[in-house]
Amino acid sequence: MKNPGLLILTVVFTALLSSSASFLLFKSLYQPDMVMIQEVAAKPMLAAYEQPMVNSKPITVPTEDFVETSKRVTNSVVNITSYSGQSRASSGSGVIISRDGYIVTNYHVVEGGSEFTVTLANRQELTARVIGTDPTTDLALVKINGDNYTPVRNGDSDNVEVGQWVLAVGNPFNLASTVTAGIVSAKGRNIDIIENAYGIESFIQTDAVVNPGNSGGALVNARGELIGINTAILSETGAYAGYSFAIPSNLAMKVIMDLKDYGEVKRALLGVSIRDLNTGFAEELGLSSLDGVYISSVNSGSTAAKAGLQEGDVITKVNNVSTNSTPELQEQIARFRPGDLVSLTFIRRGRTYETEDVRLRGIEPAYGGR
């Protein structure tokens, strides 16, 4: 009779060898389907907003503030459907800015439409009319009848800081009253989507999820104050890919008030050609920093010419507000109307100057530029 102990050891060894071989074979052949899981894992959003971890340090997220903010803001955001004849041309979102039914949205939401329907958060449908549009900022003003609507609380987009929490509220894919959260990723972004010689792009960039249908919706801070109008995403697929862009509320409200009061935008210009600074260019000019926008030419008869600005000057401030990039300078000037007075701070041959009471001019055939 064979040794029982040896027999047991042989059986155990054989079983272990078989299990190990099976595991290695399974691991080498099995490839899991990563389509949905990978897409979710790659999103730069913080799942569920419950004690997210960054660099192993917990971040406190104002979950309760988000709840209350969402309740306040959703009643101020509407769905807008545009029709051309019998066909639906487009749809998007809009933000109620007054109790008597004025609504701000994107120009591309109403572009090409002849009839418009607004659907409120309570699913009530109303006929709307377009008061005015501004393709240079991709904004439009829409009106519905009535006088008991819930307007959004206006905020100050100048006080927005990179890293602060924001909520995007809109109707992506016609899903009513959708709220997403993220942070401000950058300010003063230009992504070259407005095809207009006088187009202004000084977007607030966020990582809040925005998809088709969110256009014209609200970007609000944690207090529920409007700081931007959601306008665009940067994506190769047409769906959210981590980058969302909103028009700053201060610029949007100036444009909307012009459309409401005048039926058109009263646009002021400096009348200059400008470019951003880089390290090599700044060294060539003898500048100690990259702050400001370089003037490459001044148009005859323009605001800048009458103010004494010259080619080679670097504009650093408008009304004491820093303008460190082309979009920031364009946004600041676009907030004023022809005839308004502003102060300009600029650098010329290494020295800093300030010129006050510069009277802005509008778009005239005599000159172009910004």
Image (tube, rainbow, N blue to C red):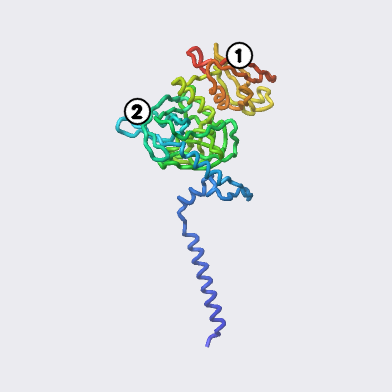
Front residue (pair 351, 117):
117
Image location of residue 57, percent across then percent down: 64, 49
- Mark closer to the observer (2, 1): 2
Image location of residue 212, percent across then percent down: 43, 38
Q: Spot the residue most to the bottom.
A: 1
Using the numbered discs, state the Cα–Cα distance from disc 2 to disc 1 in whole angstroms.
44 Å
The kind of residue tagged 2 is: Ser
Q: Spot the residue most to the front.
A: 148
How packed is label 2: few (under 14 Cα within 10 Å), some, or many (20 or more)? few
Q: Spot the residue most to the left.
A: 86
Residue pointed to by mark 1:
307
Residue pointed to by mark 2:
114
Sequence order check, earlier mark of 2 and 1:
2
- Classify 338 as above or below 187: above
Q: Secondary structure at mark 2?
A: loop
Q: Is residue 316 visible?
A: no
How packed is label 1: few (under 14 Cα within 10 Å), some, or many (20 or more)? some
Q: Which mark is residue 369?
A: none
Image location of residue 211, percent across then percent down: 45, 40
